[in-house]
Image (cartoon, grey):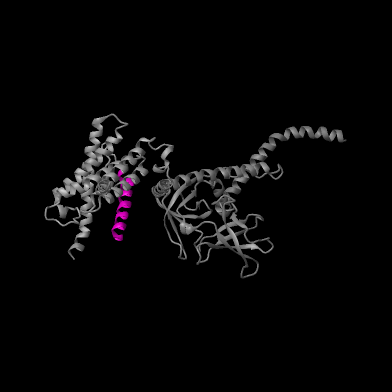
Amino acid sequence: MRALIDLIIHNKHWFVFLLLEVISLVFLFSGNGYQKNVYFTTANDVVGTTYNVISGITSYIHLQEVNQELEMTNEQLRKEVYLMRQQLETMQQDSVKRMPALPKQYDLVNAQVVNMTLHKTNNLITINRGEADGIRPEMGVICSRGVVGIVYMTSRHYSIVMPLLNVNSKISCRLRTSEFFGSLVWQRGYSNIAYVTSVPRHAPVKKKEIVETNGYSDIFPPGLPIGVVQDIGDSPDGMSYFLKVKLFTNFSTLREVSVITNYDAPERRTLEEMATDPAKQDSVLINQEKQKELEKEQAASIIPVTTNENPINTDTVR
Amino acid sequence: MNSIVLLRIGRLFILLLLQVLVLNNIHLFGYITPLVMGYMVVCFHRGTSRVEILIWGFAIGLLCDMFSNTAGMGAAACTLIAMIQPVLLDRLSPRDSEEGLIPSITSLGFWNYTFYVFLLMLVLHGCFYLLDAFTLVDWPLTLLSIGGGSVFATLIILCIELIVHARRDPEHHS
């Protein structure tokens, strides 16, 4: 008996070896990883979690691609929403109130911010799209959260955008509910705060009201969100409000933006130029005179008919 | 004693991650996947209790199995080399060497160490792929993955050894 115990103790590694091998082979041949020994497969919680973490890390590598795709989809959807809203508006309007057709669509060009300053007086953003992509100065730039700024200069493949965070930037805007308009300016300091000036004192302004573009300028279509009223103050002359607005756009993390390329119908711009340019005004007047002459000619061609009719009428009256 | 256990646990996890996250994704020529988890067993110094080696070997084999869905194959293979390792190390170490000899290029000499690692790897891959081949009948392919895997794994282990020693040597001298 003692000899047997001695033998076991002396050769315990053989027994351990056989035991472990048997365990391994039992794992191997008992259903090889199906429901039976789920604990020893990747279905195990610990292993699953580990792989989850790893895939989290590896997916991080592809994040930029995914981001771009999302931004594209966003663009598409935003465009669609805009169109839908336009349609809804026209459908809801009374026939009496019906407005002339609004610009039915606008095109967006996606771009990435390649350089940006935030803490200067005249902050500028550089984006990686330029004239080759159809971008021209004075086009509106937006991001998924709201308005970013206006294209300021363009080169072939890059453009410089004057963001809201520039003391020279001035964007006309309105309060979403009351539609009173003002203009949005920025003062040096915080990169998420801007101010709305020249909102009349009789406007009903509340905190947390949304400030959006009003579509008066030919840069942004109406209704794009800019920010939310955070504080209500008075302008130095006391004639209007001076509203502190928290911007929706987070400039410090801004990366993907889009440029509104064809919102502005060139027709409108030429018309406005004509209105302000005296030389062109003349040409408008000339045009109008020509128009009048044409009308006269048309009237003259109708006159015989009316002259025929008139005597009859007068006769009957007599 | 405690620090040795900690060192082994650290080595276990590093090898596990290396095996599972990197090497399991390598399929050289389509079927050569090196099983570097065997390095765990290669490292045990002379005179370590054989039961201890067996348990550590079984542990890393089983952990790798869990991550690669090869239930039991890795465990069986690693346990087998854990059984052979002390015998092989005894044969290959110089006669006048101390009891606690740590197998390395410097202690065994380059060729002896390479031979030692290669033999262990050959047994490991042999066992692993033969168990695998119970379900696959294509034996030339099995032979290729055994041979290729052993050579590849030996090269990787030699690289690891060189890197670790480049760092560890100055401490030894001091």
Whether residue A106 sits left or right of residue A291 in the image: it is left
Q: Residue at x 75, y 34 (%)?
A: A306
Task: Residue at 55% x, 49% y: name it.
Answer: A269
Q: Quadrant of the N terminus of chain B?
A: bottom left
Measuring from the top left, give residue A308's x and y in whole percent: 77, 32
Residue B52 seen in the current view? yes
| Magenta part of the chain | B1-23
Nearest the camera: A42 or A262? A42
Q: How many marks?
A: 0
Figure check: B3 above or below A104: below
Q: Outermost residue toward the front?
A: A1
Who is closer to the viewer here, A72 or B130? B130
Residue A1, position as x, y percentages in the image: 28, 46
Image quarter for residue B81? top left
Does A65 sit above or below residue B163? above
Quarter of the image for the C terminus of chain B: give it.
bottom left
Residue at the limit of the structure toward the top, as seen here: B137
Q: Position of residue B43 (x, y in %)?
A: 23, 52
Spot the residue most to the right. Answer: A318
- Residue at the extreme left: B95
Q: Nearer the viewer, residue A266 or A249?
A: A249
User: Is A54 within the magenta?
Assistant: no
Left or right of A165 in this view: A290: right
Magenta region, main secondary structure: helix
Can the viewer see residue A292? no
Horizontal placement of A64 versus A146: left or right? left
Residue at 18%, 55% in the rendered image: B101
Q: Position of residue A81 (x, y in %)?
A: 57, 44
